[in-house]
Structures are given as C-alpha cells and as structure tokens.
Image (cartoon, rainbow, N blue to C red):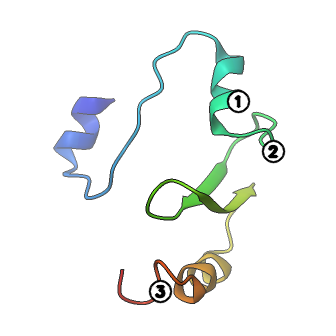
Amino acid sequence: MLEFLKSKQSAVTNYLFMESDKYALTEAIGKDWNGALPYTVLLEPGGKVVWFHQGEVDFHALKRVIVEHPLMGRVY
C-alpha cells in the first residue's frame, strides 16, 4: 500500500493501520463508525474530526463544509 501511495505521489498525509485486529481499526477511526464502507472522515489540521459520512459522499456538501471551516476555508 505504501508503495502505491508513493507511486501516485500522494500530496496528503496518509496513515496505514497495521494492527491485525479489525475491531481495533473501528476503535481507532471512531465510535460512530460501524465498519461499513465507504466511510469518509474530514480532519482539520491537528487531527480533530470535522465531518464524517458513511456511504456515498455528496461532494458538493463536503466542499461546503471545507469552505465554511475556519481552519481550512477556500485557501488552505
């Protein structure tokens, strides 16, 4: 997975979860996640969860959350 991200020259920080216990991943992601995919999480700089969504994402709604967020906004 790391090689794939490097080959795509990913411009964002990516975290790889290396535990074998799948329930530990659920705990690491957050108590609101039931393990179903897709699950999208938006974090502000520093790691605080700003927005999360389980299922297909409405990208216009997500963009609105980003634009209106004081730490991200239009120019972050």
* Residue nearer the viewer, 27 or 6: 27
Report the amino acid beneath label 2. Answer: Asp
Q: Residue 32, which numbered label?
A: 2
Numbered disc 1: secondary structure: helix
* In the depicted structure, whether residue 49 falls above or below residue 7: below
Q: Specify whether 12 is left or right of 51.
A: left
Q: Residues within 10 Å of mark 1 (few under 14, many from 20)?
A: some
Q: Position of residue 9 (x, y in %)?
A: 19, 51
Image quarter (top left, top right, bottom left or bottom right) of the C terminus: bottom left
Identify the image quadrant of residue 20: top right
* Sequence-first disc among 2 and 3: 2
Q: Position of residue 63 (x, y in %)?
A: 56, 81
Report the amino acid beneath label 1. Answer: Thr
**Disc 2/disc 1 C-alpha distance (Å):** 9 Å
Image quarter (top left, top right, bottom left or bottom right) of the N terminus: top left
Numbered disc 3: secondary structure: loop
**What residue is pinned by disc 1?**
26
Asked if labels 1 and 2 touch by Cβ distance under 8 angstroms, the answer is no
Numbered disc 2: secondary structure: loop
Report the amino acid beneath label 3. Answer: Gly
Residue found at x 48% / y 26%: 17
Q: Residues within 10 Å of mark 3 (few under 14, many from 20)?
A: few
**Disc 1/disc 3 C-alpha distance (Å):** 29 Å
Q: Specify whether 23 is left or right of 42.
A: right
**Disc 2/disc 3 C-alpha distance (Å):** 25 Å
Q: Specify whether 9 is left or right of 46.
A: left
Q: Position of residue 33 (x, y in %)?
A: 77, 41
